[in-house]
Image: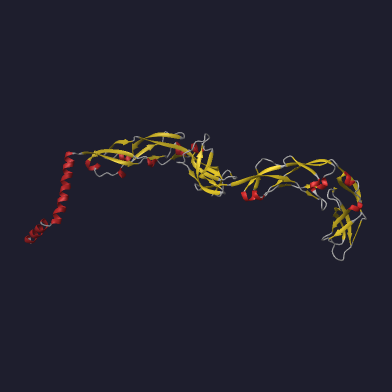
Amino acid sequence: MDFLKKLSLRKLIFDKRFTITFSVIMAFLIWMVITVKQKPIMQRTFTDLTVNINLENTFVAENGMNIIGDISEQKFTVVVTGPTSAVSGLSAADLGIYASAGEVDAPGTYSLKVSPTSSTVAAEYEITSITPPAIDVNFDYVDTEEFTISASAEGVTAADGLIAESGLVGGTESDTVTITGPRTVIGQITTVSAVAKVNKTLSATETFDAEIILFDAEGKEIDQKHLTLSTNKVKVTVPISKKKTVPVKVEFTNAPSGFDASTLAVSYNYANVTVIGTPETVDKTTQVNLTPIDISTISTGTKNFDLSLKLPEGVRLLDSIDFIRVTVNAAGYSEKTIDVSSVKYTGLSSGLSTSSLSSIKNVKICGPRNVIRNLNADNITAEVDLTDKKTGQHTVPVKFKLNGYNNVWVVGQYTTTVTIK
């Protein structure tokens, strides 16, 4: 048995792997003994530590304030001194540093002293220095507000004959953005602009990616570092338009068939207007019509009408004109009252007949004096539309046809009573 033990020990001693492992362990133990005896106190430096700030029972927590920014971005260097046996095995995770927010009593930036946590203070080792010794922390209320986005297209020009209009915000459900952040920063925002860097000449409407930039009342850009925007993806559309000057024109309703409106002396306070819109629409626009004038309201003398403009879709006025004043001058005209006996019925259903008054009394006619002088009942026909009328008595409007004349009209509205059998 003793022989076998001696043989096993002998084999281990001459085993190369065993001797290497045994040598390493013994060297470490010897180093530890020498280190502890010769250097019982040790100093170590730890980097990239972060601070903890407890807000419990502080003005900050009780008043709904927040720490603005990420305090973990500030890194600290900690020097630890203590017994080698305690310090040699430390890691950064074993160390704790904190800052107190107890003195914070209003929004603002405070320099808070950094100290070891109580658990660290009670340890066998000592934190002999913390660098930096303080941390600047911004405290504020966090607000959320909605802002309207304005569009800005930088470096845009239009091709010859075209106009680059102000940009329009797109790419979002609306032209607003919700911004959340420190109250002191939110309160500085006066303009939210979607800025697109175009830097080219456009011949047609185009849309560009844009960046949201915030500005204060002095036009200075506001740092968005501590702000959260509901959207950052917006687009700016730059409309390319064309302008053109065209005449205005008024039309007349309730005029006799064949009436020539050009025989009336009509003037406008703005005979021409400048329109602007999409190039293809503007190219097709040759005039701008006004709301029509009921000619039956015009008699002798001069009469003014304030009429709105009927603009084609996709076109608007370049100038701020709400209406056009139209003057109809009938100063050289006269009136005549005639009983019209010639009555023509249209639209009467088959098998039905009519009976009515023998004539339509006191029909007032207006026109040039030399024409009115020779006008008589033989030149006028009353027209009555009986479409969809059933048996019974009906009061229906009357229209008139002035045979052989294109420059006279009927003044007023007329009706007649018709019995259908």
For the point 29% across and 41% down, which residue is it?
A: 46
In the rendered image, the quadrant that contains the C terminus is bottom right
Residue situated furthest right in the rendering: 358
Q: 87 and 172: which one is in front? A: 172
- 349 is higher (above) or lower (below) than 320: below
Residue 137 is left or right of residue 42, and the answer is: right
Residue lying at the far left in this picture: please name it: 3
Indicate the quadrant containing the N terminus: top left, top right, bottom left or bottom right: bottom left
Pinpoint residue 208: horizontal percent, then vertical percent.
Answer: 52, 48
Q: Horizontal and vertical percent for residue 94?
A: 30, 44
Horizontal side of 264 relative to 216 (left or right) equals: right
**250 displayed left or right of 242:** right
One can see residue 129 in this view: yes
Q: How many marks?
A: 0
What kind of colouring is applied to the model shown?
A: secondary structure
Residue 121 visible in the displayed image:
no
Quarter holding residue 321: top right
Residue 324: x and y in percent read 73, 42
Q: Quadrant of residue 86?
A: top left
Query: Residue 164 falls in which quadrant of the image?
Result: top right
Between 37 and 147, the one lying in front of the other is 147
- Which x, y percent locates residue 37? 16, 40
- State the residue in front, 257 or 46: 257
